[in-house]
Image: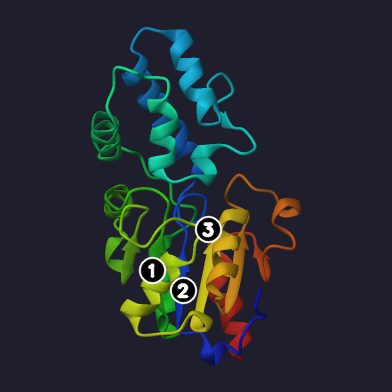
Amino acid sequence: MTTPRETGALKAVLFDKDGTLFNFTDTWAYYCDRMVDRLARNDDLLKDRLAAAVGFDRKRRVFVTGSLIVNASADEVNEAWLDLLPGKSSEEIVSLNLEIYADLPVFPTCDLTDVMTSLRTQGLKLGVATNDYEAGAVAQLQRAAASSLFDFVCGSDSGYGRKPEAGMVHGFCELMDIAPHEVVFVGDSTHDMDCARNANVGLSVAVLTGPATEDQLTGHADVILPSIESLPDYLGRMQA
């Protein structure tokens, strides 16, 4: 992992979405409830199997360690469900995903407008990189009145690959005409921090607003912050 560069060399911030910009459990427990209800209809046993396949505990409405919902791409989650639904096609499941995304509630982890405006005053470009589908990310940002705050939004279907691969960071850099060492990557999981390391970013920042604990993130990030709300001040102090 690279060490933090001088703040003057940092030109952009690339954010993970769920657990970083938006509360993870509130949003994705709702999503899982809706998906398994629609996929299994009145079959409660199948609902439990579908939930377990992606690491969602339906009774406690929590995500277990290693959950696909937390760590995997949207396609990988769909593939896990497809294995239990021989009568369904991948196209049907993707279509249902997009339908539910259109009504997915949003619970920002903080005032996104305030945070992103503060970062922009420091001259930083802003982007979002998620293992969700791009359309789902755009829809959530629009419902949070936050889509105009970002210069770049990509998902696992945008052509840059999936985290923890480096492609999303490199795609962001190419479009913003910057280098990876000029990027701050912010996420809530070791998956995100692995992506930051693989892309050789200038600064990796883990936040504690997702399922991962501080102990789980320690050693994977250059710095750990309570939430993205602390990021403008942190970068501002680096500049001083």
Residue corresponding to mark 3: 164
SS state under label 3: loop
Find numbered disc 1 in the image and state the secondary structure of the residue it sits on: strand
How many angstroms separate mark 1 from mark 3 (CA)? 16 Å
The part of the image, by quadrant, that contains residue 57 is top right
Q: Are marks 1 and 2 in contact (CB under 8 Å)?
A: yes
Q: Who's the residue at 52% across and 72% down the image?
A: 199
Single out the mark in the foreground, 2 or 3.
3
- Residue placed at 36% from the left, 19% from the top? 85
Give me the disc on residue 181: none
Answer left or right for 80 relative to 5: left
Instruction: Count neighbours of disc 2 (C-alpha within 10 A) and say few if under 14, some if 14 to 19, many if 20 or more.
Output: many
Residue nearest the viewer, comparing 143 with 39: 39
Q: Are marks 1 and 3 in contact (CB under 8 Å)?
A: no
Please state, as top left, top right, bottom left or bottom right, where the N terminus lies in the image: bottom right
The residue drawn where x is 46% and y is 73% is 13
The answer to whether residue 53 is seen in the rendering is yes
In the rendering, at what x and y percent does residue 112 appear?
Answer: 41, 61
Which amino acid, mark 2? Val
Q: Earlier in the sequence, mark 1 or mark 3?
A: 1
Q: Is residue 115 visible?
A: no
Tag of residue 13: 2
**Mark 2 / mark 3, whichever is N-terminal:** 2
Q: Marks 1 and 2, Cα distance to the nearest angstrom?
A: 6 Å
Above or below, 72 against 56 in this view is: below
Name the residue that disc number 1 marks: 127
